[in-house]
Amino acid sequence: MTIKIILLLVFFVVMLGIGFYSRKHAANVNGFVLGGRSVGPWLTAFAYGTSYFSAVVFVGYAGQFGYKYGLASTWIGIGNALLGSLIAWVVLGRRTRIMTKHLKSMTMPDFFAKRYESESLRVAASMIAFVFLIPYTASVYNGLSYLFGMAFDIDFRICVVVMAFLTGVYVIIGGYMATALNDLVQGIIMLFGIVAVIAAVLSGHGGFIAAVKELANVPSDVMPGAYSSFFGPDPLNLLGVVILTSLGTWGLPQMIQKFYAIKDEKAVHTGTVISTLFAVVVSGGCYFLGGFSRISGVQAAADGKVAYDTIIPMMLSSLPDILIGIVIVLVLSASMSTLSSLVLTSSSTLTLDFIKPLFVKNMNEKKQLIWMRALLAFFIVLSVVIALDPPAFIAQLMGISWGALAGAFLAPFLYGLYWRGVTKAAVWASFICGVGITVANMFFSFIESPINAGALAMIAGLVVVPIVSLITPGLEKAKVDDIFSCLEEKVMVEKKVALPKEEK
């Protein structure tokens, strides 16, 4: 117990110290929300990765999908690394940074308003972001509570309140830069922690080969050895999880906002490599670990069903105290980095895209900072209230949030960066599809899994936006040309970056 407490205290002191150190960077709105658009490659990459993976992935998703799909759940981590990190940076990173700076946009709703010349889109997007980031935040609190309960045997409500308070302090004081610096420290902890935990768990089963053999002997209705096979017992549903958790990041405001803050071209190249490797280790490691859940003991819930959220804590409960302490700091790091990103995104979006344009149009910079900090505290309190009495288990909460947000925002944001022909009506259609499919499925359950419903919402948006754009009036050509002019500007680069044309 002493080891666990010491590790936690050191972690909290470092985190709060970074918050106070970063307060000089949060003196204005641009600094508070985007770190002055001067965040380097390592900070940006770790901010992206740590915001991506939280206690939801480690406890909820790794446990549930590892139990359902066995070792094949590792494909989810591979998808997160390739589609959710590598390709996302290549496709979105540079263009997002260029166009958002040209439009002087600091949030995703602000991008929609300026890209499509519609204040109503700004308001609608800000409300969608605010409403559906709340269950996401609650799921992170909820996931962490299971591990704290296992390690310290204390009421999970205490864990939730303490974590919320500490997150609020360093984000309110230091803004985006405090979040980014803490993400770097937390990301390093996650990298070393996940490797140590996997090694310890496999060692407890006699090593990797012995553990796989044991998993192959687990009975399955599909085929012998299904849980140690290449694609697992249910490849189709596994694909739905890969799509939601990988492609979904392309439409999440708290993820996309990391590209807004990129410093320069070097940060794009380096950040792409770092964030991809980070995802391979952390996400791949989490799902790989979860793949062995069926041989590690599974606890049944009161209704006789599998208690997915207890699987990973049970797998770890027999580890030595020092490793349990590392796991706690690992998951705490993952969770607090995600929480800080969520609350910062929500408070800035609500202030800049809802309250300022609708109610306090002449809000000066000082008042904007006050509003953002106040709403940040409000958002944390509200999500804590939900976390103390969650309506569903972790993966459902996160699936609902990701489905609605990515279903609504992914298509109009992606197409808006590349295609001049996207119309306002198409953006509205995407908003309606994303939120409509997700909410309707919550009440009518026409798709059993909220994960698959979220994947469907994203795919629907990608199909609906071009169709609606082709049959509805477009934006004024001159204004669209001006928006895209930033991509055509000539810049001087070194020959190692781009080959010159040969003179005839």
Image (tube, rainbow, N blue to C red):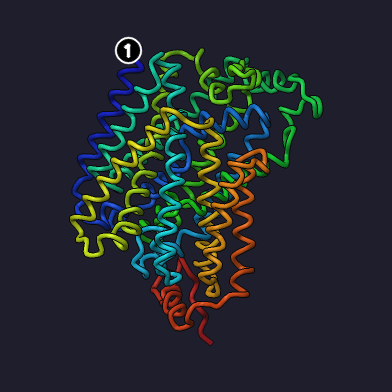
Tell me which corner region of the image, top left, top right, bottom left or bottom right, holds residue 133. Answer: top left
Horizontal placement of 68 versus 104: left or right?
right
At a point 28% along the width and 34% down the height, the residue shown is 15
Near-viewer residue (14 or 366):
366
User: Is 415 located above or below residue 337 in the figure?
Assistant: below
Near-viewer residue (2 or 131):
131
Question: Pointer 1: what residue?
Answer: 2
User: Is 2 located above or below residue 90 in the figure?
Assistant: above
Element under disc 1: helix
User: Is 476 located above or below residue 177 in the figure?
Assistant: below
From where the camera sits, is residue 271 visible? no
At a point 46% along the width and 36% down the height, the residue shown is 54
Near-viewer residue (52 or 488):
52
* Farthest bottom residue in view: 504
Labels in figure, total: 1
At a point 42% along the width and 72% down the height, the residue shown is 117
